[in-house]
Amino acid sequence: MLPRRYHKLVRVLEQRQPDLTVLLESVHKPHNLAAILRTCDAVGVLEAFAVHHNPEEILPFFSGTALGSEKWVFLHALPDIDTAIGSLQQRGFRVYAAHLSERAIAYDSVDFTQPSAILLGAEKWGVSDRALELVDAQIAIPMVGMVQSLNVSVAAATILFEARRQRQAAGLYDRVRLEPETYRRLLFEWSYP
Amino acid sequence: MLPRRYHKLVRVLEQRQPDLTVLLESVHKPHNLAAILRTCDAVGVLEAFAVHHNPEEILPFFSGTALGSEKWVFLHALPDIDTAIGSLQQRGFRVYAAHLSERAIAYDSVDFTQPSAILLGAEKWGVSDRALELVDAQIAIPMVGMVQSLNVSVAAATILFEARRQRQAAGLYDRVRLEPETYRRLLFEWSYP
Ligand SMILES: C[S@@+](CC[C@H](N)C(=O)[O-])C[C@H]1O[C@@H](n2cnc3c(N)ncnc32)[C@H](O)[C@@H]1O
Ligand SMILES: C[S@@+](CC[C@H](N)C(=O)[O-])C[C@H]1O[C@@H](n2cnc3c(N)ncnc32)[C@H](O)[C@@H]1O
């Protein structure tokens, strides 16, 4: 491998944020999945999660089989929304449902320097009622137009770049956040694909 | 029309920002165009602009013929990039090319409370060299991942929501920004489609 490539990998791993992630609930349009994973990569998300009634449908996006940003952001399939939210909470994440509702708080009032998972809902149906029961809070991006909702990859990006802004200000990109073990393993895997 | 609907239209027009816009250079994937116009509507963009070598290809997005957010954000076709950038500058806009380059400044260091047009480039080729010569400045969204660029609708949203944040703080959504004549005309057109 060229030294330049190697330094790029190192630089990227040094800025990965293991405590920032997304959980996709039945998001299924390939262009939306691709755009979301690309944004995840850009802000340093290490791994992402998906719950999907029919995982085969979005199989190319699960790590290993794809050629785009999916290669750099591990997408894990989880069997159901209870397991998904529960396991993230158990690992210390606060889970925020991106959902425009009366109960939602403004997305930029959340402290994203803490371990945070952003739950995004399906293109047509949004976040499920069950998920809304389980999450720690609902967050919304204010809108002043006629249309009722944003595209899901746009909503994801707006929230993730707000998280990036806060984490940047807090210096979270300035020190290595991965466990040494994870860091070494990934550097090896990415170097010798 | 129901009074509730009427009040919604009034509320939306009261928050429209005639001095914030996007200029799309050969952006042509329908899902990207749709996502961008939807975001424009959400942050209060009044009208948007496009330069396209083959306008017929994206005809459904030009005002009047479409059913989605295109209905609420006028998309104007302009013949070429010189005309497009020139006419915006003549109307007092600063034109910012969203373009990741050495010369670009960080998107969140720009003062978007001033009349601003954000130029976005084609999915594959990005902003043209000619456009880069003509714009007032290049702006970039910092990325810390492996992938080279964001999806174009994601880039548009990230910049537009930063503009919204600044304009919100400056009180620009708290007073009517449209000329009385434009306001009345649009209220009429939107009320009786
Ligand atoms: C197209 S929207 C779903 C719309 C669906 N009809 C609903 O009522 O929830 C897809 C997803 O994008 C996210 N989203 C869209 N606009 C949002 C906003 N303004 N604030 C927060 N999340 C948003 C949510 O996660 C939503 O489930
Ligand atoms: C997919 S990108 C084009 C990539 C193209 N290969 C290039 O080198 O410009 C489409 C458009 O999204 C915008 N864009 C994507 N990532 C960006 C970033 N990090 N900063 C600013 N604009 C970006 C630019 O307007 C770009 O022309």
Image (cartoon, coloured by chain):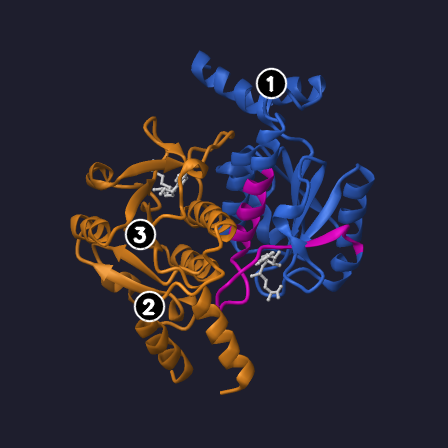
Chain colours: A orange, B blue
Q: Are marks 2 and 1 on the same chain?
A: no
The correct choice, above or below, for B126 with respect to B111 in the image is below
3 or 1: mark nearer the eye = 3
Mark-to-mark CA distance, 3 and 2: 25 Å
Instruction: Tell whether position B120 is magenta.
Output: no
Judge by depth and name the residue closer to the eye, A50 or B90.
A50
Ligand 2's quadrant: bottom right
Q: Position of residue B75 (x, y in %)?
A: 63, 40
Check disc 3 and report the residue beneath it: A24
Q: Chain of mark 2?
A: A
Residue B104 in the figure: left or right of residue B159: right
- Secondary structure found at label 3: strand
Judging from the image, mark 3 belongs to the subunit labelled A
* Mark nearer the viewer, 2 or 1: 2
User: What separation in Å lies between label 2 and label 1 (alpha carbons)?
Assistant: 61 Å
The kind of residue tagged 2 is Glu
Percent x, y of residue B41: 54, 35
For label 2, the residue is: A179
Identify the subunit bearing mark 1: B
The residue under label 1 is which amino acid type?
Answer: Phe
Q: Quadrant of residue B18?
A: top right
Secondary element type, mark 1 = helix
Residue most extreme to the bottom: A1
Q: Position of residue A74 (x, y in %)?
A: 33, 66
Range covered by the magenta-colored residues: B134-163
> In the shown orientation, is residue A132 left or right of residue B4?
left
Identify which amino acid the numbered label 3 is placed on. Answer: Leu
Towards the viewer: B65 or A47: A47
